[in-house]
Image (spheres, rainbow, N blue to C red):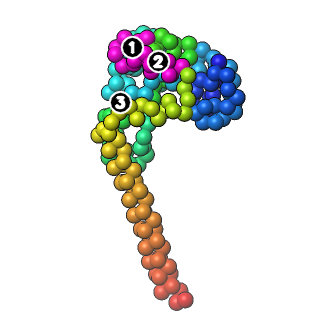
Amino acid sequence: MDYCPDCRALCAGRKRCPVCGGRRLRPVRPEDPVFLASLSEQESGIAAGALKDAGIPCMEQREGAGGVSSVFLGRSRSAGVNLYVPYGGLKRGGDVLRGVGLLRERETERSEKPGPEDRAEPEKQKPSSTGEKGQKAARIFSILLFLLAVALVAVLTDLLTGWLRSVFHW
């Protein structure tokens, strides 16, 4: 089984990564972090605790809007979190999450063979939720902030230019 270190995807029998298209594939090592599941913020806390209790290290990576907009608007409790575990603990990690009711059989099979559709599928499974609306609101807010910043820079540049002209009598 090959592994893409750029996006942490398993790539069975491929020359290119099915997720990012990279060509830096190498044989997977037991300690390589691989995608286990995409969960909500609350579910990821439960999953991380269960994995820790089982002695399986995990890494969480948040999805969606981040940066300045998340500082202003806060993070949605239903925002997606991708959960990664070492390849050596993938099967046992799936068993642990199934045991606490956070993973169905179909999702475990999919995590062992990720593809481009895997990353988008969890969002398609959830009908319009508050988290998605919050992400859209955060994106719109970020765009408005950016436009406001550009307008502010233009106005301040014009004022500074006018002041310099009056000082130096151009």
- Decide whether residue 98 is among the magenta residues: yes
Quadrant into which the N terminus falls:
top right
- Return the residue at label 2: 108
Residue drawn at (43%, 68%), measured in percent from left and top? Answer: 151
For marks 1 and 2, the one nearer the N-term is 1
Q: Residue at x 63, y 21 (%)?
A: 12
Main secondary-structure element of the magenta-colored stretch: helix
To which residue does mark 1 refer? Answer: 98
Whether residues under marks 1 and 2 lie with C-beta atoms below 8 angstroms apart, the answer is yes
Provide residue 132's location: percent of width, then percent of height: 35, 41
- Report x, y in % for residue 47: 38, 19
Give the amino acid type for the residue marked by disc 3 in the picture: Glu
Per the image, label 1 sits on a secondary structure element best described as helix
Q: Which residues are magenta?
A: 95-112
Neighbor class of circle 1 (other Cα within 10 Å; few <14, some 14-19, many 20+) is: some
Task: In the displayed orientation, state which residue is furthest to the bottom.
Answer: 169
Residue at the (38%, 31%) spot, across then down: 125
Distance between the Cα atoms at labels 3 and 2? 19 Å
Contact flag, marks 1 and 3 (Cβ < 8 Å): no
| Of pointers 1 and 3, the one earlier in the residue sequence | 3
Residue 58 higher or lower than 18, as above or below: above
In the rendered image, which residue does mark 3 sit on? 41
Gap in Å between the C-alphas at discs 1 and 3? 17 Å
Q: Nearer the viewer, mark 3 or mark 2?
A: 2
Q: Amino acid at mark 2?
A: Thr
- Residue type, mark 1 in image: Arg
* Label 2 Cα neighbours within 10 Å, binned few <14 / some 14-19 / many ≥20: some
Question: Residue 13, located in which quarter of the rendered image?
Answer: top right
Q: Is residue 170 visible?
A: yes
In space, the residues marked 1 and 2 are separated at their CA atoms by: 9 Å
